[in-house]
Amino acid sequence: MGKRDAGRGSADDARQGQPKPPPTELSSLDFTGGDIPHALAQCAGLVEVQEMDAGVGAVYEEAAVLYANGDTEEAEKVLDAVIDDPAASAGEGLWMMLLDLYRLTGKRQRFESRVLDYATRFERSPPPWEDLSSQRTAGRGDAAPLVNLAGSLSSKASAQFQQIGVIGRKSGAIRIDLARLRAVDDAGCKLFFDLLRQLAADRVKVAVLNCQQLVNMLAGQVSPGQAENREIWLLLLEMLQYTGEQDRFEELAVDYAVTFEESPPSWEPRAQPVQGAAADSGAPCKSADGPRLEGVITGAQADSIRKLAAFAADKQAVEVDCAQLRRIDFVSAGTLFNILATLQAQGKLVVLQNVNAMVGALLRVMGVDQVAQVMLRS
């Protein structure tokens, strides 16, 4: 039996004896290259995605199996072959697997050689380059310093912002939590905006936590066509880059240009992987206190998976940050399935956020997407 067949056998073995749960949503990506027929299950608002084309589906599964086994080179060859084959009609899902594989293995040149073809084929902006190969799992002592902004964001916070800058430059990374922020004015916005720009210029990695409340406060203080509160406009545009809301950013940028008759800032996602923070391009402002799956998880290192059950004991819905999860093997994926199936049977909803496409493919092969929502990262 060859390496690829052995890997697929492991997938089947890992699923032996597991009950078939009701279907739920995986993602909106098309893995077939054509239209997937969707059976919409109205009960509980769930969506069932029917089987993909057998040929492309086999490649999808094979690449996922190889990557789970740690055989990145073979996984890349399999994906390259189907994407370069005009007759295969590889869909966006397979393309995202290959692009994520390049990011996970640090192959920037190969990534950049593919993104133009991706943009041309699917008529949309490709995902940005991010080197995911060097991210490491943070221990308790590795967390970036956490500071809280509380009360009113005004000119009186000048000394506090100076101290935040000192801490950030000294540590090289910082987390700023906005959960306790209650008010904001133009002067305070300028201080915060200038701080973020200075930290970026000093190459300090920044995670802004719980910033949606600030976004809402700022949005209520800007009026298209009224050239006032400029610093609030600028901070709002900055915050939208931390929340990853590009469409909203682009719309506001046009309003800014018309209102102030000057070029707005350019879109550039601000999310950066900061140790100890919920940091990812899709949901960087989530609380850092929630559960996370990180690094490479194998059967001997599945404690973080087992802790999910304890964390969810008194909750009906749990969001798990997977932004720094690079790879998970079959044994661990089987453990994850069993825990999530138990939680689903208890009426609990678990959402795996910001999953890379390679891990997402394995989770689908293992049926994890049928007992939890699996949301792929951008």
Image (cartoon, rainbow, N blue to C red):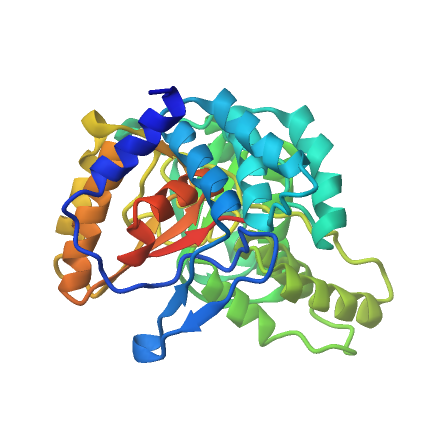
Picture quadrant where residue 127 is located: top right
Front residue of 268/259: it is 268
* Residue under the point 43% across and 34% down: 62
Front residue of 243/374: it is 374
Residue 42 rendering spot, x and y as whole percentages: 36, 79
* Residue under the point 64% across and 27% down: 108
Q: Is residue 298 above or below residue 164?
A: above
Picture quadrant where residue 128 is located: top right
Residue 94 rendering spot, x and y as whole percentages: 55, 43
Q: Is residue 210 left or right of residue 239?
A: left
Q: Is residue 312 above or below residue 259?
A: above
Q: Is residue 290 above or below residue 99?
A: below
Q: Is residue 236 left or right of residue 300?
A: right
Q: Is residue 315 visible?
A: yes
* Residue under the point 75% across and 40% down: 116
Q: Is residue 131 visible?
A: no
Residue 308 rendering spot, x and y as whole percentages: 20, 48
